[in-house]
Image (spheres, rainbow, N blue to C red):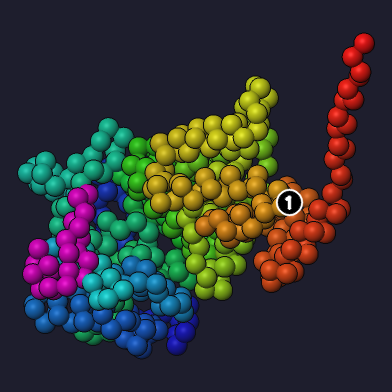
Amino acid sequence: MQKSLSSIFGQSVDKLRTFIPGNGKKKARTYQRREVPRDQHNVSRSAISEPAKKVLSRLNKSGYEAYLVGGGVRDILLGQQPKDFDVATNATPEEVHDLFRNSRLIGRRFRIVHVVFGREVIEVTTFRGNTADADENSTDDDRKTNEHGLLLRDNVYGTQEEDALRRDFTVNALYYCIRDFTVIDFANGIEDLRNRQLRLIGDPETRYREDPVRMLRAIRFAAKLNFDIEPETEAPINELAPLLDHIPPARLFEEVLKLFSAGHGEITYDLITRYNLLAPLFPETARAIEAGEPDELIRQALRNTDARIAQGKSVTPYFLFAAMLWPALQREWQHRQENGESVQPALHGAIAKVIGRQVQATSIPKRFSGPMKEIWELQMRLPRRHGKRAFVTMGHPRFRAAYDFLLVREDCGEVKPGLGEWWTRFQRQNEHGQERMLSELSSGAPKKRRRRKPTKRPAP
């Protein structure tokens, strides 16, 4: 970083204005608008992608206000490389869409614009207003909540100040102006960055009720940034965790992928367990663990996932869900066998029941649930290697994922050591070497006693 975060404080600012945002229930703390000049922060145009700069420049040249906002500014201030860049503007979504032929309007709850540059997508949002001050027509048409306080629609537009205080966390309410290179801080976000603290803007209970997914975002950012969750921000989470039951399963599926695919999976798992958020996301898994099923396989799978992400490798959602649901599957499978079902039918019945219940919490697209079933089913086939079985199993499209899952099971002590190492060597051998390994396997197996044919007695 060109300037440490601590060096920003104590400096004079060009403009300072105090205002108190409304949040629908109670007055929040008083915030000060700070403009930090270029020589007092480390955000540089060179750290911003070319597509993001094009969007900012075109909006500004067309007479609109436009700022880089949120995680992009936050991550650059922390000396990190942002994964994506978001833009906030006073232009309406339709006006933004008209400016960019390579854009599309999306969203019902919040209308936003995606400007597409090849693989990079710049998300452009219109400044959102202080909905508590919206007029009656706006409230009826553009802002709707359900009986739990959950926002169903929120398209009230406003000023930049109002937009900042409608954002979730103080560290995400930071704006970068590409025209004069200032960083604008509306909610003491830079101070919270310095203190490595995650704080909600406004009354935490109200903000969580408006959108319970903010509880998951708090966990995700705390794990990603290695921040503490500020006491008032964390206090309502345990009690309000069941509100996630009112979130559409498809949205929660996407949130689960964000939680566990960012390279901090094990820390994230610890946090969602601590704050009672596992049950809304994986209810059967939570019940199985509470009943005594171990969760070491989940932890080991997340450690492996974190290592893969650190190495730049991809992570498949079906492998992640296969691990997260494994304790639930084990419990149901065992229960069915104890009730008299044979092993194979019990497994198939357990798979159907566990997935059927899970999709009520988080949807699992068929392109993922199918491979997940195959990973589980192959765990029964991997120990059976005699004759041609090993070749048939290795030719299965999901063999590699099932093999990796087997290694996780060995690492956490669920399977006796040796089977995973055998499959590792078998894959490296040529055909002759594989035949030799199978021959050795057969020679070491106990021979079955042949049944003697009954001798025919001579007729009397």
Residue 42 can be seen in this image = yes
Mark 1 Cα shell of 10 Å, populated few (<14), some (14-19), many (≥20): some
Give percent across and percent down for residue 147.
27, 32
- Report the quarter where the C terminus lies: top right
Region in magenta: 94-115
- Residue annotated with mark 1: 386
Quadrant of residue 345 in the image?
top right
Give percent across and percent down for residue 228.
53, 59
Quadrant of residue 265 in the image?
bottom right
* Residue ID at (37%, 84%): 47
Q: Is residue 186 left or right of residue 427?
A: left
- Residue 264 lies, with reference to residue 153, above or below; the image says below
* Residue ID at (55%, 55%): 396
Q: As rendered, which of 378 and 236 lies closer to the eye? A: 378
Residue type highlighted by circle 1: His
- Residue 181 lies, with reference to residue 186, above or below; the image says below
Q: Reply yes or no: does residue 97 show up in magenta.
A: yes
Q: Is residue 157 left or right of residue 452?
A: left
Secondary structure at numbered mark 1? loop
Residue 252 can be seen in this image = no
Q: Reply yes or no: does residue 196 show up in magenta.
A: no
Q: As rendered, which of 346 and 154 lies closer to the eye? A: 346
